[in-house]
Image (cartoon, rainbow, N blue to C red):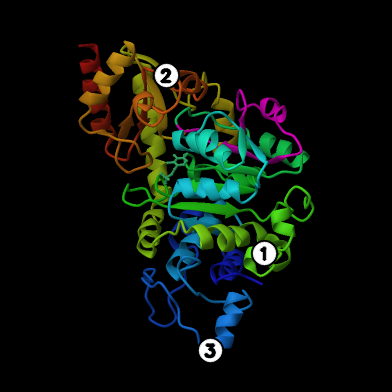
């Protein structure tokens, strides 16, 4: 029994999609529209869907019939995106939402209740840190930040009120690569799921579900969309975590939901209970909906993600090598170098392909970093990553500005640090820009 079209097609589509990621990125989740024969995914710019009769409507509301009711709950264009993203990550199903932040929020809220806690690695995207440190606690869910991303550091914080372990597969901006397998084993030992934000790695470089992760989420805004035009988020369920087996910790999936005529999600959705609840409870009532046009734009971006990542990785390596050999640079944090503490993890999880997101310490500290940043001409100064364009940002004064100095240090944000997201332009132009900005930084 499935909710709202998207789901059933995903499961059916999934069996057919045994293709490589490059191919899934182009074809996954869509077959030529049977009515119109449209080859590109149609944009279903509609809020509602007509009912044949009161009985038909009732069957839809009872989630007994396949179909759509209202775009806040599901939309055919977005359903294609959901199937495609689920297939790229090797998951059972996906729910797409209006932003990466909405995905983080829903993914965590869906497993917690008043008094629960989650245990998180310390290296997080700045806004996720704010959500965890300030917003969730005000709603009765606490987040326990470990000292480091080592499994032992997280294990100390787990108790019988812990609902999940949370990490970013590749931390933004710290660039740390988590030992997903070890964290998944730890979570499962304690009867809880591992939730992984896979935004920075993208499913082209790393698929956390293959290493034991239960829930994966994305800011589609970044590498997947790839062009800096559209905000979006996705939550992907592996379908592997047994909410039923751990019913005392997760009553929300196992007891009747009074807000949805007594539905028991594990009974109705089986393996799909997690997203069934996320969609009918959170998405339906709090409404962080992805617009159909955004789904279309993100689908367009995803078609080229494998090609783009290949170029991002190549350019990233050349930039890292250029910077490492330059006396004006104090340090380069890049997992592709053997001396990186995360080199082994990049080998284990990413086939040695480090991301094109890296941080650089500009010689001369905070002032020099600002001069370097302000002198860039090709690189755009902004807070975003994963765009086809090369991007630079100074986390200490932007994304991580709200954090205390102590918290900044904990998240790996230093005053001289510039975060680069190396784009897919010609490498000579990228290096020439960095070279002239470094000269400016020493003036
Ligand atoms: C950007 C980002 C987010 C938030 O995504 P939005 O789409 O901007 O809301 C979450 N996690 C990571 C790792 C990110 O880089």
Residue at the spot of label 1:
258
Residue 61 against residue 103 in the figure, above or below: below
Q: Which residue is pictured at 22% across the width and 16% down the height? A: 439
Q: Position of residue 177 (x, y in %)?
A: 55, 31
Name the element at disc 3: loop
Name the element at disc 2: loop
Q: Which residue is pictured at 47% across the width and 72% down the height? A: 70
Location of ligand 1 given as a quarter of the image = top left
Identify the image quadrant of the C terminus: top left
Q: Position of residue 278 (x, y in %)?
A: 58, 57
* Residue extent of the magenta highlight: 144-172
Within the magenta stretch, is there residue 407?
no
24 vs 427, left or right, is: right
The quadrant holding residue 281 is bottom right
145 vs 288, left or right, is: right
Q: Which residue is pictured at 65% across the width and 61% down the height? A: 272
Within the magenta stretch, is there residue 152?
yes
Residue count near mark 1 (Cα–Cα under 10 Å), binned few <14, some 14–19, many ≥20: few
Nearer the observer, 222 or 256: 256
Q: Is residue 353 among the parts visible in the rendering?
A: no
Nearer the observer, 173 or 405: 405
Q: CA distance from mark 2 to mark 3?
A: 62 Å
Q: Nearer the viewer, mark 2 or mark 3?
A: 3
Residue at the spot of label 3:
53
Q: CA distance from mark 3 to mark 1?
A: 26 Å
Q: Which residue is pictured at 24% across the width and 19% down the height? A: 371
Mark 2 or mark 1, earlier in chain? 1
Residue at the spot of label 2:
414
Q: Position of residue 347 (x, y in %)?
A: 57, 32
């Amino acid at each position: 029994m499935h909710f709202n079209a998207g789901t059933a097609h995903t499961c059916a589509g999934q069996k057919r999609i045994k293709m490589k990621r490059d191919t899934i990125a182009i074809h996954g989740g869509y077959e030529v529209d049977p009515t119109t024969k449209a080859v590109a995914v149609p944009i279903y710019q509609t809020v509602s869907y007509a009912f044949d009769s009161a009985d038909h409507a009732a069957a839809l509301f009872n989630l007994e019939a396949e179909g759509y009711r209202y775009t806040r709950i599901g939309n055919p264009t977005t359903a294609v995106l959901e199937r495609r993203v689920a297939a790229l990550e090797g998951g059972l199903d996906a729910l797409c939402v209006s932003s990466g932040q909405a995905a983080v929020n829903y993914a965590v809220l869906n497993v917690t209740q008043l008094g629960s806690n989650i245990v998180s690695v310390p290296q997080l995207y700045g806004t996720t840190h704010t959500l965890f440190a300030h917003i969730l606690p005000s709603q009765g869910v606490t987040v326990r930040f470990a000292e480091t991303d080592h499994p032992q550091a997280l294990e100390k914080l787990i108790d019988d009120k812990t609902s999940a372990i949370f990490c970013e597969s590749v931390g933004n901006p710290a660039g740390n690569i988590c030992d997903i397998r070890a964290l998944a084993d730890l979570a499962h030992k304690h009867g809880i799921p591992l939730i992984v934000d896979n935004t920075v790695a993208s499913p082209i470089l790393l698929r956390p579900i293959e290493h034991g992760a239960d829930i994966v989420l994305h800011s589609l805004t970044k590498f997947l969309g790839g062009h800096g035009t559209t905000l979006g988020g996705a939550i992907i369920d592996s379908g592997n975590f047994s909410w039923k087996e751990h019913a005392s910790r997760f009553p929300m999936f196992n007891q009747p939901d009074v807000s949805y005529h007594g539905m028991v999600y594990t009974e109705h959705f089986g393996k799909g209970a997690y997203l069934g609840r996320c969609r009918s409870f959170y998405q339906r009532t709090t409404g962080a909906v992805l617009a159909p046009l955004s789904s279309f734009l993100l689908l367009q971006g995803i078609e080229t993600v494998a090609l783009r990542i290949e170029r991002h990785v190549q350019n990233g390596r050349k930039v890292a090598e250029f910077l490492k050999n330059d006396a004006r640079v104090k340090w380069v944090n890049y997992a592709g170098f053997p001396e990186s503490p995360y080199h082994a993890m990049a080998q284990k999880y990413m086939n040695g392909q480090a991301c094109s997101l890296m941080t650089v310490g500009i010689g001369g500290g905070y002032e020099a970093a600002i001069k370097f940043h302000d002198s860039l001409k090709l690189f755009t100064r902004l807070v975003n990553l994963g765009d086809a364009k090369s991007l630079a940002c100074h986390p200490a004064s932007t994304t991580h500005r709200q954090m205390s100095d102590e918290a900044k240090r904990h998240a790996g944000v230093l005053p001289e640090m510039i975060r680069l997201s190396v784009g897919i332009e010609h490498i000579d132009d990228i290096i020439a820009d960095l070279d002239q900005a470094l000269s400016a930084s020493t003036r």
